Image: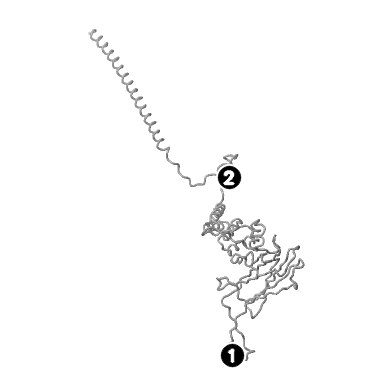
């Protein structure tokens, strides 16, 4: 009995040791398998990230709708460049309008400038560029409206005020020849002898010193007025008065549309007695314009003639528009002046006239 018990105890101890070894080996295999699969999963994840990065990297970046900050100038820090204010909408429209006009697209240029003016109606630069654009389009009535706005602003408008004052007094120079379909106008002041008022141009013998328009009420005339034109010579010039030629042209509008030379009665009269320019005082020439009313015989034919009342009618849709004065000496143009100034654009004077 003791022998059997001893064998059983020995067998149980061997079995326990063997079972323990089996358990230890099983646990070791489990740990090995776990580390193996964790390593494979980590490698697969790293590989997937690399593939994803490869696929995403070549894609183009999205286009931003916001304006990028201005590039830093040489010697300027990025922080300072980022703090530089962006141009306003009015400034952008102004710049676009000028560029479009210089390329000959005056219609689009005017649209940009008008849009800028609607945002800032008192912007001097915008009003000036609108006036210049109208001149480039040869719409002189509209350009004069812009110049008048600048003139009304006074000296606070700076150089634009001086330019507006000069434009309204002297008009714009004759537009330069441009390519087909492109209207352009020089923005420089007119040539010295072309449009003189208040002085004598350099290189000229004579100048128009002043022009006064006086309207005289006349019950028998639709329009009755006179121009007093002051003409002065250079102080050191010796004048042959037979070589002085003064031409005054009056113009009418017909049916508020066409511009034509007047058919009214025009008369010349010297107000200074000698008009030979032997001294430096200006000689004064008076030129009158008179358009009589059209008389219609009164229907009161039963009355004596001295009691009949004349009836007047309008004269064919003609209305006085303005004048153009040309001054020649020795057949060479000395000065030209017009009111309105666009008459010099519509009817440019000749540099010389042929002797009779």
The crowd level at tag 2 (other Cα within 10 Å; few <14, some 14-19, many 20+) is few
The residue shown at (59%, 62%) is: 143
Judge depth for marks 2 and 1 and give the one in front.
Answer: 1
* Identity of the residue furthest to the front in this view: 356
Rendered position, 80 above or below 127: above
Number of numbered labels in the structure image = 2
Rendered position, 302 above or below 86: below
Q: Nearer the viewer, residue 239 or 83?
A: 239
Residue 84 badge:
2
Whole-percent x and y of residue 150?
A: 63, 60
Rendered position, 70 above or below 274: above
The residue shown at (28%, 13%) is: 14
**Residue 4's image quarter?**
top left
**Residue 276's image quarter?**
bottom right
Residue 301 badge:
1
Whole-percent x and y of residue 96?
A: 54, 53
Q: Quadrant of the C terminus?
A: bottom right
The residue shown at (63%, 63%) is: 171
Compute the Cα span from label 2 to label 1: 87 Å
Q: Nearer the viewer, residue 124 or 182?
A: 182
């Amino acid at each position: 009995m003791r022998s059997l018990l001893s064998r059983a105890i020995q067998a149980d101890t061997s079995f326990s040791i063997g079972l323990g070894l089996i358990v230890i080996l099983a646990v070791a295999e489990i740990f090995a398998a776990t580390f193996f699969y964790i390593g494979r999963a980590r490698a697969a994840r790293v590989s997937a990230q690399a593939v994803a990065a490869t696929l995403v990297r070549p894609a183009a970046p999205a286009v931003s709708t916001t304006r990028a900050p201005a590039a830093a100038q040489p010697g300027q820090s990025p922080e300072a460049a980022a703090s530089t204010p962006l141009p306003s909408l009015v400034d952008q429209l102004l710049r676009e309008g000028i560029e479009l006009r210089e390329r000959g697209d005056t219609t689009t240029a005017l649209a940009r400038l008008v849009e800028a003016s609607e945002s800032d109606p008192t912007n001097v630069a915008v009003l000036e560029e609108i006036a210049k654009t109208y001149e480039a389009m040869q719409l002189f009535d509209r350009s004069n409206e812009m110049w008048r706005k600048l003139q009304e602003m006074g000296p606070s408008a700076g150089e634009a005020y001086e330019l507006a004052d000069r434009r309204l007094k002297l008009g714009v120079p004759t537009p330069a020849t441009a390519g087909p379909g492109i209207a352009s106008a020089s923005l420089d002041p007119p040539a010295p002898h072309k449009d003189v008022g208040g002085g004598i141009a350099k290189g000229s013998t004579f100048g128009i010193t002043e022009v006064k328009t006086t309207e005289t009420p006349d019950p028998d005339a639709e329009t009755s007025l006179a121009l007093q034109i002051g003409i002065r010579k250079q102080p050191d010039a010796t004048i042959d008065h037979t070589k002085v030629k003064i031409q005054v042209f009056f113009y009418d509008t017909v049916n508020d549309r066409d511009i034509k030379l007047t058919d009214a009665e025009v008369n010349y009269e010297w107000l200074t007695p000698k008009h030979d320019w032997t001294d430096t005082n200006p000689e004064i020439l008076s030129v009158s314009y008179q358009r009589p009313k059209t008389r219609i015989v009164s229907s009161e034919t039963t009355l004596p003639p001295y009691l009949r009342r004349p009836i007047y009618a309008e004269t064919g849709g003609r209305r006085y528009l303005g004048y153009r004065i040309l001054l020649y000496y020795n057949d060479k143009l000395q000065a030209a002046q017009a009111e309105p100034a666009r008459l010099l654009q519509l009817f440019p004077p000749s540099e010389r006239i042929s002797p009779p």
